[in-house]
Amino acid sequence: MTHYPRLLEPLDLGLITLPNRVIMGSMHLGLEEVADGFDRMAEFYAERARGGVGLIVTGGISPNDDGRPWDDGAAMTNSDDVTAHRVITQAVHAAGGRIAMQILHYGRYAKHARLVAPSPLRAPINTFVPRGLDSAEVEATIEDFVNAAELARQAGYDGVEIMGSEGYLINTFLASCTNERDDEWGGDAQSRARFALEIVRRTRARVGQDFLVLFRLSILDLVPGGSTLAETIDLAKQLELAGVDILNTGIGWHEARVPTIATSVPRAAFATATAKIKAAVGIPVVASNRINAPDVAEDLLARGAADMISMARPFLADPQFVAKARDGQAERINTCIGCNQACIDHTLSGKITSCLVNPRACNETMIDLAPTRKTKDIAVVGAGPAGMAFALAAAQKGHRVVLYDAASTVGGQFDLARRIPGKEEFNETLRYFRAELPRAGVDLRLGSWIDAQELIEGDFDEVVLATGIVPRALELDGADHPKVVTYLQVLREEVSLGTRVAIVGAGGIGFDVAEFVTQEGTSASLDVAKFYEHWGVDPTFEASGGAVPAHPHSSERQVYLLQRKASKVGAGLGVTTGWIHRAELAARGVKTMSGVAYVRVDDSGIHLVVDGEPVTLEVDNVIVCAGQESQRGLLADLNAAGVTAHLIGGADVASELDAKRAIHQGVTLAAAI
């Protein structure tokens, strides 16, 4: 029996036949600009090619200097660039894969002083104001796109993807809200589309018919004044006539106030919009955004919503995604959970992209998990993210690993995080480890307390302490009052809360708990209709940009989120997801207070000093989210007996819970042992 027959069906494009309907979507890796980056990218892409993906699309490469993302951002402008890129194309082709280079002009999103746009309108998420291109510069920019495509062909790419989505330069020509020109490149929809169409027509003429040309089309801008559905469908038809082979789809501008790829977005939330484009054209149309499992992809193809499926971050999480699906082992896929923490957050922070659940992503040449030459007996205490990651990687290398945890299930604090509304995908990581640990030969001993003497007598070659954290106690008068509960008690649903609640501590855990205690009914991350209503997406897609007024669901529980720091509440949240959490709490009526001094808890509530004035919050409960302390009870006894133990995860550093760091520590330690 063929597993996922539609997903794995070859696609004959005339000039080339792709082995399946899977595209690895574009991601900027941060390797494009580092000294040894092209060698590292070559191995990164080659590993995905070996994993069976039908077509790879690179991260965005600028066609000229103005379009770079930042001053030293990657570009394809000359023969030196061609030579550098051949390292990538040769590696992918040697692995049996196909690869296209994405041509991306950042436009008004660029982080340098030379940025340009159709009109001099600053993007809300940028501090730089773009210069409006004059007519001659528009023509020159078109030629730069065409030149980049020609150079990509010389570099050995199988095609190019022209980036016309997500609010970058081409997209801003298309939308009336960013194109205020009154010349031949602005005005009505047809004139605004001319820039995109001329790039495609001239590119096709230059590269010939035996070279793939993809176009990334924004099917929902999700900003006021964005393109209408009718305009987008008309553009799709014209792009087909202009010579596009495949229409890839993009959702939402970076400045849109609607989440599009975070874990709080339902799976395949925007595929209905993709279906409307597919119905209008005869070339393959690609569905994208929050598609992270082969059964979801197969269903979309079966329903006729798309001809192909683009998945980007799922190939960070698991380069063998397609091979595992093909071999009937989909349950072994290490699923992308849409957290953004090590991928997009890294990109926007100037770091090299990776993956929370797979830190080898983009580090394939740096983290070696080849079979060991010397098998060791290793004890791991603690089956949270750090302990699980270490145990699995070490066992896969060939070590004999025993993993202890006093709990009856794996996951540690991650098992609590999955209960937060919008973080249901975290279940996937736990599912993966539950399946893979025994498969790799890990001796998993749950519900098993172990003391230092047992570890010493076990005669292990290595002992790894991944014992995690304990919540920091609240240090003020009344901390032992019945009103006071810990976040662990709340998330485990061991206590019943009243209708008025104060949360002490506004870090990541405080925000999670606030969302947990204000959730009513089904999470919007599990219900597309509720998500659309909550965030303001037109279900008919006919409104300008597909954006309509949001109608978020409030909470009947009054919650106060408090912090000692005088800084903005939530300032330490993720670069790309922090605004989502802040918007969620605002919609639910959560009141945030910073610069708070805690005085005491008593029968009347929690007493504070704010801006020098006494304040009493008459609450039923006080939930403590005031930080954590490393749990290292075994360490001293082991050291006293001469046993050196490795500390990873929360046992090493307890400042906020950080699964990204914990899993990275676990895998890198396993690589070193």
Image: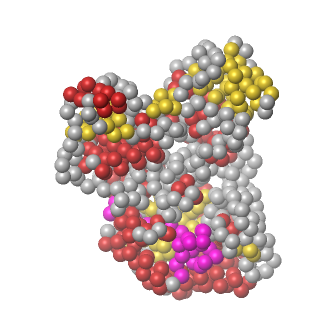
Give the residue displayed 64% in from the left and 28% down from the top.
Answer: 503
- Residue 275 visible: no
Left or right for 124, reference 426: right
Left or right for 73, reference 35: right
The vertical placement of 132 against 407, above or below, is below
Give the residue displayed 43% in from the left and 76% down from the top.
Answer: 85
- Colour setup of the view: secondary structure
Q: Residue 582: where, in percent of width, then height?
A: 67, 42
Badge count: 0
Q: Residue 574: where, in percent of width, then height?
A: 58, 48
Give the residue displayed 60% in from the left and 23% down from the top.
Answer: 475
Most frequent secondary structure within the magenta stretch: loop
The vertical placement of 322 against 644, above or below, is below
Q: Residue 437: where, in percent of width, then height?
A: 30, 40
224 in magenta: no
Please tell me in which quadrant of the rendered image residue 595 appears: top right
Q: Nearer the viewer, residue 409 or 563?
A: 563
69 in magenta: yes
Q: Residue 321: where, in percent of width, then height?
A: 38, 54
The vertical placement of 314 against 654, above or below, is below
Please tell me in which quadrant of the rendered image residue 38 appears: bottom left
- Residue 13 visible: yes
The residue stretch that appears in magenta? 50-77
Give the residue displayed 38% in from the left and 75% down from the top.
Answer: 87
Please tell me in which quadrant of the rendered image residue 252 appears: bottom right
